[in-house]
């Protein structure tokens, strides 16, 4: 099972995830269905990504929900944010389920629960789910009380929801040429359609569902989107966009065919939201680049750091009434639309940004200060010893998730893993040399504290 710092043995930060039919079986999916059906009595929406095992797992979840007497609305293959938006916007929907392993390799799958407001289950909700799941005390509805199962279409509602929140005229007037690489994932029939409705000339790449992921790895990081970069150049396009398997993330390639780092995109969008709002709070995990904080401060706003993981970012966004939030992995959260990462909405918002700025993305991105971030991991079998040592030594550090230590010209994050015997070390500075120095200092510090 892949999980990191989640609620318990079964539920990680991304719900339940593992190799399909080995670690995550149809039997488990059935009981997970019974669990959500028990917890959120009423009508539960379900969607899935395009993986080979998704339909099997979805059918098992549906059977579980109906068996305890709750109704099911099946929306079929959908990006995770589309399922979340459907749950949020549809009256009488009491919860949601998405079957997806996001950006993980093809053999994986996952099941994640969604709250009635469209947000991911919080850690506390997952803990409750885990208790119900393990108790195995499920009611069995009588033959005439089993839940009804119906299908619904989410696409129009989802597209309209996004189109309503961007300046369509400004985007359409530019007649942008856009290359979209869906990686054969869940957004394959969604983002290209949105781009067309925004008046773009669309070149689609890997935009048909194929759970084998024949074209590229599902994670839209720079090393996986080489073909997109080439096609942007060959097609002389204004922008390239790539999604992960469930499209809660989007990454971008500028008009020159260069990948724009996820942190820079987060900083750009955060800055824009703060400018438009004349201030406000942006929420991001402690692992995000300093370029976000610099850009937000420059625009007159403030950054609040959280632990790593999107549910906690959303939780804090609610608490502080944030104007924007996101992670440095291409997961951006537009609170006026949905309190969840939405890669499809990111595509629309980035096009709006380029249109309104009236400059190409490469030019706009230049405004964001550049840092060098380096990451490594070292062995750590004594998490508590490491953390207490760090607390003693760096009293000024932020301990929301590991220790983020600020220096005059950079920062260092030392995070013991919740699931593996390692500590992750992140170092960032304006120069590569300085980042290397900080990383070295981090490694030495961990080794010294652990003895
Ligand atoms: Mg994802």
Image (tube, grey):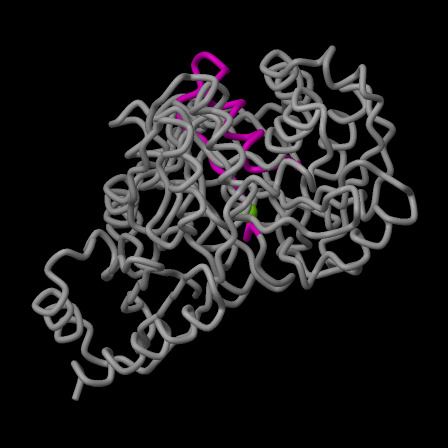
Residue 42 rendering spot, x and y as whole percentages:
39, 21
Residue sitting farthest toward the right: 234
Is residue 55 among what the camera can see?
no
Task: Indicate the quadrant where residue 1 lies.
Answer: bottom left
Seen in the picture, residue 355 relative to 313 is either above or below; the reply is above
Seen in the picture, residue 248 relative to 227 is either above or below; the reply is above
Quadrant in the picture for the C terminus: bottom left
Left or right, 419 with respect to 257, comes to left
Q: Give the range drawn in magenta.
A: 77-102
Residue, x 86% and y 50% (percent of image)?
231
Seen in the picture, residue 196 relative to 80 is either above or below; the reply is above
Residue, x 12% and y 73% (percent of image)?
389
Asked if the magenta segment contains residue 10, the reply would be: no
Task: Indicate the quadrant where residue 192 lies.
Answer: top right
Choose between 259 and 29: the one closer to the eye.
Answer: 259
Residue 384 rendering spot, x and y as whole percentages:
14, 71
Choose between 338 and 289: the one closer to the eye.
Answer: 289
Choose between 67 and 403: the one closer to the eye.
Answer: 403
Is residue 101 among what the camera can see?
yes
Residue 250 rendering spot, x and y as whole percentages:
62, 42
């Amino acid at each position: 099972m892949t999980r990191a710092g989640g609620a318990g043995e079964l539920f990680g930060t991304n719900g339940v995830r593992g190799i399909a039919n080995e670690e995550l079986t149809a039997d488990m999916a059935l009981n997970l269905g019974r669990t959500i059906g028990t917890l959120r009595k009423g009508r539960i929406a379900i969607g899935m990504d395009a993986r080979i095992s998704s339909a099997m797992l979805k059918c098992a979840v549906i059977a579980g929900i109906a068996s305890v007497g709750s109704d099911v609305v099946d929306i079929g293959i959908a990006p995770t944010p589309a399922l979340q938006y459907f749950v949020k916007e549809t009256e009488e929907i009491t919860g949601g389920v998405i079957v997806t392993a996001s950006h993980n390799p093809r053999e994986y799958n996952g099941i994640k629960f969604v709250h009635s407001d469209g947000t991911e289950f919080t850690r506390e909700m997952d803990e409750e789910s885990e208790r119900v799941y393990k108790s195995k005390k499920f009611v069995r509805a009588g033959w005439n009380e089993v839940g009804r199962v119906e299908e619904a279409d989410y696409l129009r509602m989802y597209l309209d929801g996004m189109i309503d929140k961007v300046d369509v005229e400004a985007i359409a007037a530019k007649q942008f040429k856009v290359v979209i690489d869906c990686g054969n994932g869940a957004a394959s029939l969604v983002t290209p359609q949105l781009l067309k409705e925004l008046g773009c000339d669309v070149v689609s790449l890997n935009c048909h569902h194929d759970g084998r992921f024949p074209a590229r790895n599902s994670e839209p990081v720079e090393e996986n989107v080489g073909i997109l970069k080439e096609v942007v150049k060959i097609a002389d396009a204004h922008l390239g966009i790539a999604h992960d398997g469930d499209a809660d993330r989007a990454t971008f390639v500028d008009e020159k065919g260069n990948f724009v780092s996820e942190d820079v995109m987060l900083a750009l969008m955060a800055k824009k939201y703060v400018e438009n709002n004349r201030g406000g709070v942006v929420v991001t995990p402690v692992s995000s680049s300093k370029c976000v904080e610099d850009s937000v401060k420059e625009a007159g706003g403030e950054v609040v750091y959280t632990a790593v993981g999107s549910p906690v970012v959303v939780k804090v966004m609610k608490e502080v009434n944030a104007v924007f939030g996101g992670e440095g992995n291409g997961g951006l959260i537009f609170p006026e639309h949905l309190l969840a990462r939405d890669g499809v909405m990111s595509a629309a918002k980035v096009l709006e940004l380029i249109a309104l700025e009236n400059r190409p993305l490469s030019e706009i991105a230049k405004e964001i200060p550049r840092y060098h971030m380096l990451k490594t991991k070292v062995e750590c079998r004594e998490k508590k010893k490491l953390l207490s040592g760090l607390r003693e030594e760096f009293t000024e550090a932020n301990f929301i998730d590991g220790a983020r230590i600020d220096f005059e010209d950079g920062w260092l994050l030392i995070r013991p893993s919740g699931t593996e015997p390692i500590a992750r070390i992140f170092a960032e500075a304006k120069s590569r040399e300085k980042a290397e120095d900080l990383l070295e200092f981090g490694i030495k510090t961990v080794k010294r504290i652990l003895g």
